[in-house]
Image (tube, helix red, strand yellow):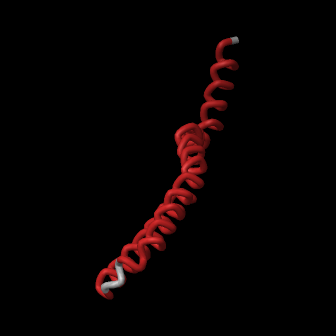
Amino acid sequence: MVELAVILLLLGAFLLFFKLLAVIFKAGIFVLTIPLQIVGALLAVLLVVTLLPFALVAGVLTVVLAPLFVLGPLLPLALVFFGLYLVMRR
């Protein structure tokens, strides 16, 4: 769920950036905004570099914990069958 929120926030930021860039191109003041574009590119790289470790940790945790969440509800049933096996073995 957190990954989806981060992806949507990044997508919204990039869409806003490109909309702003389109307005700047249409206005014909592209040359005046080069410093702003450099700052925007640096902020985008900083945002990606900052969020990437969190996204990687969340992805690894999802891969590791997903089988537990799927198989977790089957644990009581497995314990019952194991108990029946132990009782019948004697």
**Which quadrant does the C terminus fall into?**
top right
Residue at screen point 66% across, 30% down: 79
Depth check: 87 or 67 in front? Answer: 67
Rendering quarter of residue 25: bottom left
In this view, the residue farthest toward the top is 90
Q: Is residue 10 left or right of residue 21?
A: right
Residue at screen point 65% across, 17% down: 88
In this view, the residue farthest toward the front is 31
Residue at screen point 36% across, 77% down: 31
In this view, the residue farthest toward the bottom is 27
**Which quadrant does the N terminus fall into?**
bottom right
Residue 45, image x, y percentages: 50, 57
Residue 13, image x, y percentages: 47, 71
Depth check: 53 or 77 in front? Answer: 53
Q: Is residue 59 above or below residue 41?
A: above
Residue at screen point 52% across, 56% down: 48
Q: Does residue 25 appear in this view?
A: yes
Residue 82, image x, y percentages: 64, 24
Q: Is residue 24 above or below residue 90?
A: below
Depth check: 67 or 80 in front? Answer: 67
Q: Does residue 12 appear in this view?
A: no
Number of marks drawn: 0
Residue 35, image x, y percentages: 47, 71
Q: Is residue 41 above or below residue 63?
A: below
Q: Is residue 75 above or below residue 6?
A: above
